[in-house]
Amino acid sequence: MFVEYGKRDNPTVIFLHGALAPLTFKRQLSLAVNFHIIYYTFPGHGKRKDKFTREKAVSELLGIIGSIGKEKVNLVGFSLGTQIAMRFLTEQPECIGKTVLISPLIDSSKRTDNRIRRSSRLYGFLVRFWLTACLAAKVLGVKKQNYKAFYETQRHMDSKNLSRAVVYDMLKSESCNFSGDYSDKMLILSGNREAKAFKKSAAYLNDKYKDSKLVYINKAKHNIPFMFNKRLNEILSEFLGV
């Protein structure tokens, strides 16, 4: 369900991956020099065959934090991972130090919902084939030596179930009711070439939580952890305190 790297006495960072992409933060592993890193795999992702729900993911995340004996951890989520981070921040704010939301999406339109559903189903079918999986890995910036691991995490997933979960479990703006002071504690990242729905969501959260910080990554689309990993690592190191 999760793997960890680095020393536990360092600040803990839990990475919450995107939909259909358990290896989202593979290129952030170098941060384990200064941080205690945890990669958590959501239900229904990778080799897990259980049904994905936000509630289950939040419950498991709370269990992980309890198991490592930390009072507070930092969360870094990408796309679907931001959904889990925001839900957890709403329900368990006392457990969180700092939060980084990369490409968040809330209140998506029906058109966007349908596009997400279609693309995730198509991707889930095609990625079961080795050559297609390798092409997807290349596009996402996965190194060649990790292609086999990438393929293994993709071919077992139930894409239909996941596409339904991502769309129907979409976080709504009225659900984003985080309490407390967010000065220097929330960072929102978005690519300046992302779809309008993602940029609109990032701007909404930044406006609602006045003490949060919004940064646009130049030339980035919905691919910041994969293709802009060096810039992301620099931002995370600075924001999280190293």
Image (cartoon, helix red, strand yellow):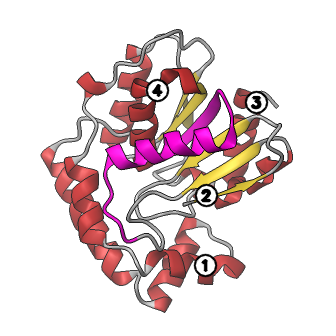
Residue linked to disc 1: 149
Q: Position of residue 41 (x, y in %)?
A: 51, 59
Q: Residue at x 71, y 38 (%)?
A: 12
**Quadrant in the picture for the C terminus:** top right
Give the secondary structure at mark 1. helix
| Residue 55 drawn in magenta | yes
The first of marks 3 and 4 along the sequence is: 4
- Residue 238 disc label: 3
The first of marks 2 and 3 along the sequence is: 2
Relative to 76, say whether 16 is above or below. below
Residue 13 located left or right of residue 108: right
- Residue 227 disc label: 2
- Disc 3 + disc 4, Cβ < 8 Å: no
Q: Mark 4 or 2, which is nearer the eye?
A: 4
Residue linked to disc 4: 92
Q: Position of residue 109 (x, y in %)?
A: 17, 42
Q: Amino acid at mark 2?
A: Met
Q: Mark 4 or 1, which is nearer the eye?
A: 4
Give the secondary structure at mark 4. loop
The first of marks 3 and 1 along the sequence is: 1
Give the secondary structure at mark 2. helix
Query: Magenta part of the protein: which range?
Result: 49-78
Q: Residue at x 79, y 43 (%)?
A: 8
The first of marks 4 and 2 along the sequence is: 4
Within 10 Å of the Cα at label 4, are there few (<14), some (14-19), or many (20+) other Cα atoms?
some
- Cα gap from disc 4 to disc 1, whole angstroms: 33 Å
- Cα gap from disc 3 to disc 1, whole angstroms: 30 Å
Between 115 and 43, the one lying in front of the other is 43
